[in-house]
Image (cartoon, rainbow, N blue to C red):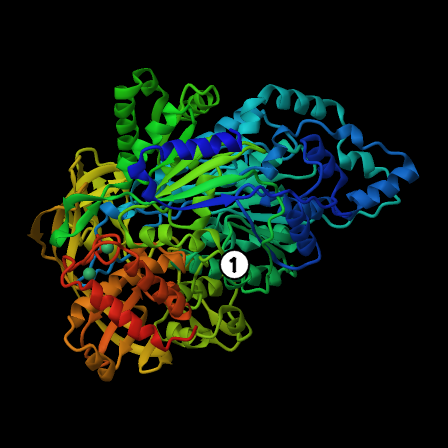
Amino acid sequence: MSPQRSRTALERLLADPTRRDRITHVERVPARQGRRAAWPSWAPQLLVDRLTAAGIEAPWEHQATAAEHAHAGRSVIIATGTASGKSLAYLLPAIAAIYGEEASVANISAAHSATGEQLSAQTGSGTSAKSTHGERIVPPATSGEELSAPNSRSDSESSGAATPDPLAQASTAAGATAPANAPADPETKAADAAAHTEAAGTATGQGTNASSGSAAGAAAKAEDKGADASSRSPAGAGGKAAGLGANAPSGAATRSGNQAIRRPPEGTVLYLSPTKALAADQLRALRALRLTRVRAATYDGDTPPDERTWVRQHANYVLTNPDMLHRSMLPSHSRWTAFFRRLQYVIIDEAHGYRGVFGSHVAQVLRRLRRICARYGSSPVFILASATTSEPATTASHLTGLDVVAVADDASPRGPATFALWEPPLTDLRGEHGAPVRRTATAETADLLADLVVEDVQTLAFVRSRRGAESVALSAKRALGEVAPQLSDQVAAYRAGYLPEERRALEAALRARSVVGLASTNALELGVDVSGLDAVLVCGWPGTRASLWQQAGRAGRSGQSALAILVARDDPLDTFLVHHPEAIFGTPVEATVLDPDNPYVLEPHLCAAASELPLTEADTELFGPSTADLLSDLVRRGFLRRRPAGWYWTRRDRAADLADIRGAGGAPIQVVEAATGRLLGTVDEASAHTTVHEGAVYIHQGESFIVQTLDLDDSVALVEPAEPDYSTTARDITDITIVERLRTTAWGEATLCFGTVDVTRQVVAYQMRRTQTGEMLGEKPLDLPPRTLRTRAVWWTLSEEQIDSFGDLDLAGAAHAAEHASIGLLPLFATCDRWDIGGVSTAVHPDTGLLTVFVYDGHEGGAGFAERGYSDATEWLRATRNAIESCECDSGCPSCIQSPKCGNGNDPLDKTGALILLAELLRQAPS
Ligand SMILES: [Zn+2]
Ligand SMILES: [Zn+2]
């Protein structure tokens, strides 16, 4: 689509004059010229040949810069856009480590002149080498608030690990099956990889309220161009590969007779991805390069025992995940001696996924890895690949415990794009407390989709839930049925759970343009190669800028202009964003946060570390400042024994089992379909009360169920399939007490604090609300025990004088409204989701004696979100005030101060009061 056409598309959408004021902003994203760099002199000639043959003339600048850092021994994070080819940055040093310097561009040139060897004969194949430049699919940051339940008196939009466990069921196959040099049939590999992707997509462990899209989305993603390249031309790649295997000498063979070149010891590479599916895709891309000396294999829960032995003994490029490192590789490190001894690079792909409690666990696993490596005399360089985030070096440093250099200047080319922000209008409908209700984002998206299809603008709409995606497709078809019936067949819906052949058929239909409009959950990001569309509609803020750009990036063919529209949902964060485009198009605002010092996370890893090698005083530096205290405590509780040489694990059970790195502690509640006994997923104990109480609507992979019973003793929730038109929200009573103030800042008379709190919540009832309108359908009591969570919180207070200056003001309503909005806005600053955090507000809190608003991490021990709120408090609370101020409603609505998950029925709330409180609070805030 030409730029001309793109404008026309947007303009035609605006032909209806009532629509014009729905556009709050239009951003013209200019094209960016790519900047190339030379191949590093140390890059293996064979790799360069293969990449060149695959059409990569030279690396982009950012790829070369990151590769040079790593090669020079500096740990590095490459945090650039989704199609910027981050994998090439780690591939160069990693392959060089395996091949050794003598195979480098520089040395080979020298060798050529000396011996006249012809290595160029080995080029060929490498079709899917393009994957190194391929567009990566970022796991979108979950969501689906509309159907989730958690809540507290003051809406603990709490929390608890809605993290899916894609590893639970995903299969491997492309895994370690083909040892070493056996070039596998690329077609088979592609199919295998697709199967993985599928498995990961449908596996979701702890689906809970994270609902549909999120569970699937966080689960996995594929190196899609890689997949595409293989699947499109399997014959060509296979043919060349066969020819290569039969005729061409390997690099090693060619040079083996050349005594003049010293061969340094072959290094090894450890590649970590958050999912098996991604590791399988990476393996396929690596194998497609036909680098004979690279013996790559996946090592995960599905690798059969005999293959495991082969991997341990022979593989020099092992692709695994943090779970496997934690449970298997580190505990049995003595069987990996040869591998760890030669370990030169640890590649951490999708590093932005390691956030919150999961990220904190992974941070400790990586410290254990470094300790084991040190034991074997190696000190690997870490190379992290991440989506664009703010402060990538800081995050990477938290994650690895090392100094890390950041490369964030993207030098890859990009076509121009038009990006519009769209706010649906208020309707005549009335919601809770008579609040005005906006037209839903899904209804608006369906209209836009239909109109674009009429214009023959090929469009993909991303919708969060499966039901939402289906409803968008259906409404668009219906609309087309009225104006252009022949077009309604050109609209389709896509969801998780499609078979590989269904996905391939969809790809083909899109390429042939027999499908012009597609509505999809972000499950599409699992292994479907769809790009080069004309337009993308993003229905609701996808959680992070990274996800937004990822989704928007599906539009635009090389050198051609694209249209993207973000349609806001009725939610404070969406409202803020469509009115503050600078928060989207300006500097990156999200930081990936984690808190490795969380004692609840650290303790079990200290036990695991002690069982791997006894801990010594020297290790306390590696594991952080709280280590010494925790060690004494672990000794006292009988987990570790103190001996003169250090701390020992002497128990018979496996120490690694103490840490559930994807969970949030406590026995998880199994969610089981009553009629079939099918295990749908697990919910951590902390959030079970709010998400799978009796009567709760439970969403799994976009399908809905109603909970029949919750048995806390047996840790089981029985559910049955249902299609209710309402969502459930738990009501609870929450008390919060301050345990310790860790940091305090005075903002004039107001005070901002960060510290440890105990949050005691008791779920006492649940409410049912109609999905479309939020209309209250009723409330039912529940009988559940209180639970106490020790966690971290950020809170602010106003002095009595400040309060007095307000005169007659509904303080409780004002504080409650400010709390709601601030919870809604925190995800803009820390990569958390609404259910990762909760809040409590009160006109007078017993521990402060003052008006106090708390926002706390919904995970035992904290997860770094509240801390981030404290450190970015000025920007965060200003954004909160702006969000409330810019909402056009009179006295509060879901776009500003109402919370869909308020444990208190959104009562009391005072919009004007909240603005007054926040203005006073911010009056003397540092700028
Ligand atoms: Zn409002
Ligand atoms: Zn509330």
Residue visible at 51% across and 68% down? 614
- In front of the other: 146 or 664: 146
Mark 1 residue's CB less than 8 Å from ligand 2: no
Q: Can residue 166 be seen in this view?
A: no
Residue 921 x/y as whole percent = 31, 74
Q: How many marks?
A: 1
- In front of the other: 714 or 769: 769
Q: Is residue 194 above or below residue 505?
A: below
Q: Is residue 684 left or right of residue 706?
A: right
- In front of the other: 370 or 334: 370
Q: Is residue 887 visible?
A: yes
Q: In which quarter of the image is ligand 2?
A: bottom left
Q: Considering the numbered disc 1 on the image, is that residue within a helix, a strand or a loop?
A: helix
- In front of the other: 383 or 444: 444
Residue closest to the far top: 486
Q: Quadrant of residue 583?
A: bottom left
Disc 1 target residue: 366
Q: Which amino acid does label 1 sit on?
A: Leu
Mark 1 is surrounded, within 10 Å at the Cα level, by few (under 14), some (14 to 19) or many (20 or more) other residues, namely many
Residue visible at 64% across and 51% down? 338
Give the quarter of the figure containing the C terminus: bottom left
Residue 444 x/y as whole percent = 29, 37
Q: In which quarter of the image is residue 241?
A: top right
Residue 240 x/y as whole percent = 68, 22
Q: Is residue 138 left or right of residue 413?
A: left
Q: In this view, does 661 lie to the left or right of 80?
A: left
Residue visible at 9% across and 57% down? 783
Residue visible at 63% across and 20% down? 236
Residue closest to the far right: 114
Residue 539 x/y as whole percent = 34, 40
Residue closest to the far front: 17
